[in-house]
Image (cartoon, rainbow, N blue to C red):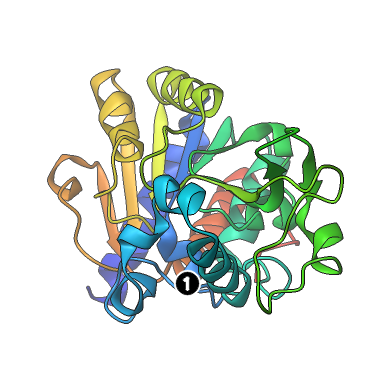
């Protein structure tokens, strides 16, 4: 895309944002990878190095060896303490500050939208979060950062400090259903939106990828910002192929210009 073509599309997205009243942002792994978090499904990602079958809930429950391996992989990914929000996260958070955001629906489990400044109650995490772990025995929920000092990932997976039950990261494993309330809220907000912006998602993981479908069926405009082509591109009102961390700040700047707001642009 030429620079001129990119500018025109950015201006069109900014106009859609400024004219909308119920904006939903839907984010996927392409946002997280720009913060250094590995994409599970892309070439070179986690599933090219580890067997996805070992990340089923059934294997987790049945095998202590598998539990240890899963904990090591997830903690070693940098999801908990190392990753920091990038320009895309900061731009989405700034849209909320401008009063231009209904909610964020995310497939990511890294808590980076909240770190960037989005209100937790406005973020619906369809695949759970690595910010917490839950005991499958007593159901006690622990902040992951508080657990790190207790977790000794040498010869066995961590156990609940209270009851010695199995501790599971509060993320969705293969074979588990999505969190019912988060999914219900995501579907509701998608159907009620007048603009849905897909950021960094290839739209191949369902049922999460139905969100732009629900929005479009309800008459909303759909924008896609993604590095690669998606199957939904031909139905979208605007498509921008580029890095989310570069494109979203440019969109935010254009929104602010149209609103007459100065300063505080996402970097």
| Circle count | 1
For the point 35% across and 57% down, the residue is: 225
Res 91 visible: yes
Residue 249 to residue 188: above or below: below
Between 160 and 238, the one nearer to me in the picture: 160
Q: Dot 1 surroundings within 10 Å: few (below 14), some, or many (20 or more)? A: some
Residue 186 to residue 62: above or below: above
Q: Secondary structure at mark 1?
A: helix
Residue of label 1: 33
Left or right: 222 as drawn, with respect to 173: left
The percent position of residue 213, horizontal first and vertical second, equals 25, 30
Res 226 visible: no
For the point 50% across and 32% down, the residue is: 23
Left or right: 261 as drawn, with respect to 226: right
The percent position of residue 127, horizontal first and vertical second, equals 49, 44
For the point 34% across and 32% down, the residue is: 211
Quarter-of-image position of residue 252: bottom right
């Amino acid at each position: 895309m030429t620079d001129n073509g990119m500018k025109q599309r950015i201006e069109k997205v900014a106009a859609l944002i400024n004219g909308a009243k119920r904006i939903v942002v839907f984010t996927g792994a392409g946002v997280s990878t720009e913060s250094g978090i590995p994409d599970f499904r892309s070439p070179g990602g986690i599933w090219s190095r580890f067997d996805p079958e070992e990340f089923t809930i059934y294997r987790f429950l049945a095998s202590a060896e598998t539990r240890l391996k899963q904990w090591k992989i997830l903690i070693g990914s940098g999801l908990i303490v190392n990753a920091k929000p990038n320009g895309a996260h900061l731009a989405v958070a700034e849209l909320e500050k401008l009063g231009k955001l209904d909610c964020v629906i995310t497939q990511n489990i890294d808590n980076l939208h909240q770190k960037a400044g989005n209100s937790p109650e406005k973020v619906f995490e369809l695949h759970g979060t690595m910010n917490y772990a839950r005991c499958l025995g007593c159901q006690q929920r622990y902040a992951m950062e508080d657990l790190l000092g207790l977790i000794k990932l040498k010869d066995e997976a961590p156990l609940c400090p209270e009851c010695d039950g199995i501790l599971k990261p509060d993320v969705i494993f293969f074979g588990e259903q999505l969190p019912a309330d988060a999914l219900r809220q995501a579907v509701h907000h998608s159907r009620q939106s007048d603009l849905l912006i897909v950021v960094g998602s290839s739209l191949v993981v369902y049922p999460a990828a139905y969100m732009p479908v629900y929005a479009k069926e309800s008459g909303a405009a759909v924008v896609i910002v993604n590095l690669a082509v998606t199957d939904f591109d031909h139905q979208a009102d605007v498509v921008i192929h580029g890095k989310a961390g570069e494109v979203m700040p440019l969109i935010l700047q254009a929104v602010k210009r149209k609103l007459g707001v100065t300063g505080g642009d996402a970097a």
